[in-house]
Amino acid sequence: MTAAPSGGAEPALRDNGPPGPPWRTAALVADVLVPDDGPPVPCPAADLLAGSLTRAGVPVRRGPVALPGTGGGAGAVLATVLDAPGPEGAHGRAGTARGAGASGTASGVGLGVEVEGPDGGPAAGEAVQAAFSAWQEVAGAPRQVLLAAPRSFCAGVERAVEIVERALEQRGSPVYVRKQIVHNTRVVAELEERGAVFVDELDAVPEGETVVFSAHGVSPAVRDDADRRGLSVIDATCPLVTKVHAEARRFASRGDTVLLIGHGGHEEVEGTLGEAPSRTVLVQTPEEAARVEVPDPGRVSYLTQTTLAVDETAEIVDALRARFPALRGPASDDICYATTNRQDALAAIAAESDTVLVVGSDNSSNSVRLVELAERHGTPAHLIDGPGDIRPEWLAGARAIGLTAGASAPPALVDAVVDALRGLGPLSVEEYETARETVHFTLPAPVRRR
Ligand code: SF4
């Protein structure tokens, strides 16, 4: 296989990574390059390349790569090496290196290295070459990140995550959590590592055990079920969701039909619907608002899911009000402060961005709404769980990258995206703050004391 980039010296390559499993062929993506005549050179774009390789079906391993004789001044962009077991095992294969290169970029020196091991098939080799080339094509160009603020965790998510952490500290593992505590893959994976067990329904929780209800809330039927099973419940429902539940009960008890604006199947909507199921009707679109029927048009209220798009929801409320002039709503908006603030912040930068990246998982309602909002401003937008999901073609020609994160996405993932982009070339970061958040919710009594 050919060496990746050209130009400069062609140093020998030595795989200096940690011993790995006995793979047939895997791509080693360098976290750091280790010249023997200079300081280690970090490879901040490693996540980008690793993500492309994973999508291409190439097993990926991460680790340092020794690169003797390159000098200490190299600002490495990307590095790969195909790793395959030789007769001597998976490591110590300096002799299999066939080439290496270095090429100058605006940010320093981009290093790309590929090595074909004895079993490295051409398919994997081509995939590595293609992934490397795609990133190399967009490396080196100066870029600007327009960072929306507020972004990432809201007060309800911080509280929910802390509740599970404290429950684990106080009660030990396992602590069962009904549904994902918040809709984020990374958060759930990290809590799982610490001993949380996520279940879809309560029948998966052994009697007498602790169960945490997620931030999205549950219906009264679920609470009753937990009581029947003798479970020790810790409720991590966001207080702003609890407020909507209380409104649903109040509106229904005064004899209204409650029109709940939201997305069917979302856990928050399921929970709110369960407060007064015989009196609540789900309305998802302006079209549904135009045809919904109620027993008494003079006694109608509406509520909304907390994580909807503000502009789209206003359209639905207007459509309902046109049909039911006596329509009553909540005293204050059900779309929560965090959802509103993140949408306002993104709206301030979306039109100036060439592309928008929204950090969040695909089941996160408020994150998906952010992607749609950017698109309504005419800017292509992409939902990513982290830097590994970024595609090189999204960055081709993009000089201004709008960056935000849904309310369930950890701030560290935004930092990781910025770091990875910095690995591609010169990067300036400018934050645009449209609101300052000071909301904090107290913890529920069962976990209040450490
Ligand atoms: Fe609560 Fe809003 Fe955060 Fe949902 S997005 S957890 S309603 S603060």
Image (cartoon, grey):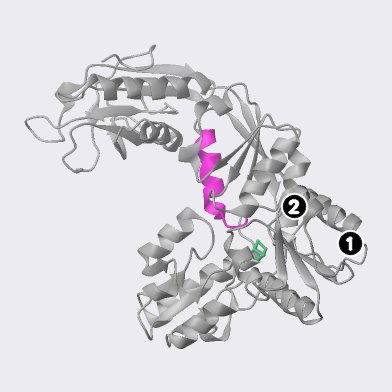
Q: Quadrant of residue 327?
A: bottom right
Label total for image: 2
Can residue 23 be seen?
A: yes
Label the magenta part by its dominant secondary structure.
Answer: helix
User: Which stretch appears magenta?
Assistant: 407-422
Q: Nearer the viewer, residue 366 or 118?
A: 366
Ligand 1 lies under 8 Å from the Cβ of mark 2:
no
What is the quadrant of the N terminus in the image?
top left
Quadrant of ligand 1 in image: bottom right
Q: Nearer the viewer, residue 79 or 387?
A: 387
What secondary structure is found at the residue carrying circle 1?
Answer: loop
Q: Residue furthest left?
A: 87
- Left or right of residue 268: residue 51: left
- Up the image or down, 337 lies above or below 67; here it is below
Q: What mark, if any, has residue 288 been given in the picture?
A: 2
The residue tagged 1 is: 324
Badge 1 amino acid: Phe
Callout 1–callout 2 Cβ contact below 8 Å: no
Q: Quadrant of residue 16?
A: top left
Q: Residues within 10 Å of mark 2 (few under 14, many from 20)?
A: some
